Image (spheres, rainbow, N blue to C red):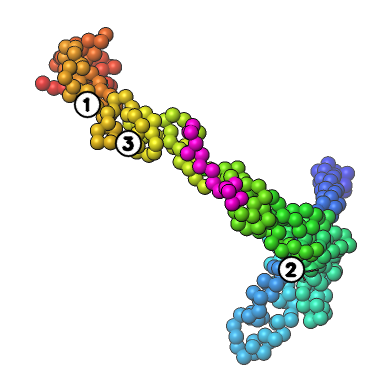
Amino acid sequence: MLSTGPELRLLRRLLSCVTLVLLFQATDAKRDLKSACTTCQKITDNFNKGFDRTAKQNFGGGNTAWEERKLSKYETSEIRLVEIVEGLCDSSSFECNHMVEEHEEHFETWWFKRKTKHPDLHKWFCVETIKVCCPKGTFGPDCNACVGGSERPCHGNGMCDGDGSRGGDGQCSCDHGYKGEFCLDCIDGYFNEVRNDTFSLCTECHSSCKTCTGGTNQDCDECKEGWEEDDQEACVDVNECSKDSSPCEEDQYCLNTEGSYSCKACDKVCSGCTGAGPDNCQACASGYQLTEGTCTDIDECFEQESVCAKEHQECVNTKGSYMCNCSSGYEEQDGECVQMPQPEKEEEPEPSETTTTPHTEF
Ligand SMILES: *[C@@H]1O[C@H](CO)[C@@H](O)[C@H](O)[C@H]1NC(C)=O
Ligand SMILES: *[C@@H]1O[C@H](CO)[C@@H](O)[C@H](O)[C@H]1NC(C)=O
Ligand SMILES: [Ca+2]
């Protein structure tokens, strides 16, 4: 039977499939002890959810007196267990389904024989039975205590690597503000408000300090950039804008801020300025003049000499400047304003003209 072509091919494919699955399982088992615990945790969480969800159900769905009596039996029934177990994993989660299938009989054992004595399913199943997790505050294959002890891993100021799983190396990654192997030291910019061998509280320094021993601007060891010590040894803001030479460009004004400063663009009517707007100019930009403390546009077209002196020209005032346009009916050609050709009736317009010039009827 097996000697025929298609069947042999099928068998070979099946075999390679099995090898693949075996390989996958082998690397999977080694791969990530932390993720095995995460999967188990999710399973037991879903079990508890399923337990709550089925709490008000019974065999039938109605509630006749007969069914009411049966309800107590449903509570501990195999049917309820099956309903719960069916909802433990997303169908797409290989790791979850694999774990549930592999240990299905444990759920039955717990459901019928262990539930009363060991009500915490996660502890019984993940930690003690299939041993993919550790108790909180412990890590690694042997569930060793985290740095700082299992009660307060990392002295309450960080995360212990692998905490609660059979993986990890137990090292602390400290919360913001803390550093060191034990998460008892403070990073720069923080100071120890409370400190003993097992407890540490790091609090942020005043914003003016680089390093400090307390919370005010008088407790700085060193001032931060943008701050300087005053005669009472407190760190105060440096007013960069009051210095002889402004740190800003010529067409900008300086704005002092706590711990820093910024440069803002002057109004465009100004040539240099001390602040925002047209009334803080040091001088007016060209095309503008000072009137009543503000730089305003000069109307060149109103000045004595005609600024647009050519024939058929008209002066057009603009903000900060002016233009010499050709009068209507005239157009510019080589710097002169010449009369525009009159559109003639019934003549075939050239393609370029039709798109640019509006047709005028007389
Ligand atoms: C360390 O300080 C904490 C908080 O102030 C306190 O509860 C603890 O007993 C202290 N431990 C030692 C060893 O002094
Ligand atoms: C003056 O000419 C410019 C282009 O050269 C044009 O944008 C502007 O609209 C003209 N102004 C008037 C009032 O004709
Ligand atoms: Ca400043």
As rendered, which of 225 and 63 lies closer to the eye? 225
Q: Secondary structure at mark 2?
A: helix
Residue at the extreme front of the image, as rendered: 231
Q: Which residue is mark 3?
A: 278
Amino acid under disc 3: Pro
Q: First in sequence, mark 3 or 2: give its number.
A: 2
Camera sees residue 136: no
| Residue 131, quarter of the rendered image | bottom right
Q: For this view, does 107 lie left or right of residue 321?
A: right
Name the mark nearer the viewer: 3 or 2. 3
Q: What amino acid is at disc 2?
A: Thr
Element assignment for label 3: loop
The secondary element bearing badge 1 is classed as: loop
Q: Residue 167: where, in percent of width, then height?
A: 82, 57
**Magenta span contains residue 228:** no
Residue shown at 54% from the left, 46% from the top? 237
**Magenta-highlighted stretch: main secondary structure?**
loop
Q: Nearer the viewer, residue 133 or 99?
A: 133
Give, as a three-letter code, the residue at label 1.
Answer: Asp
CA separation in Å, label 3 and label 2: 70 Å
Residue 87 in sight in this render: yes
The answer to the question of whether label 2 and label 1 lie on touching residues, with beta carbons closer than 8 A, is no
Residue on which the image places disc 2: 44
Dividing the picture into quadrants, the one containing residue 281 is top left
In the rendered structure, which disc, 3 or 1, sits on the residue that comes first in sequence?
3
Region rendered in magenta:
229-246
Mark 2–mark 1 Cα distance, whole angstroms, equals 83 Å
> Disc 1 designates what residue?
299
**Residue 12 figure quarter:** top right
- Asked if the residue under mark 1 is in contact with the one under mark 3, i.e. CB atoms within 8 Å, the reply is no
Figure disc tally: 3
242 up-or-down from 11: above or below: above
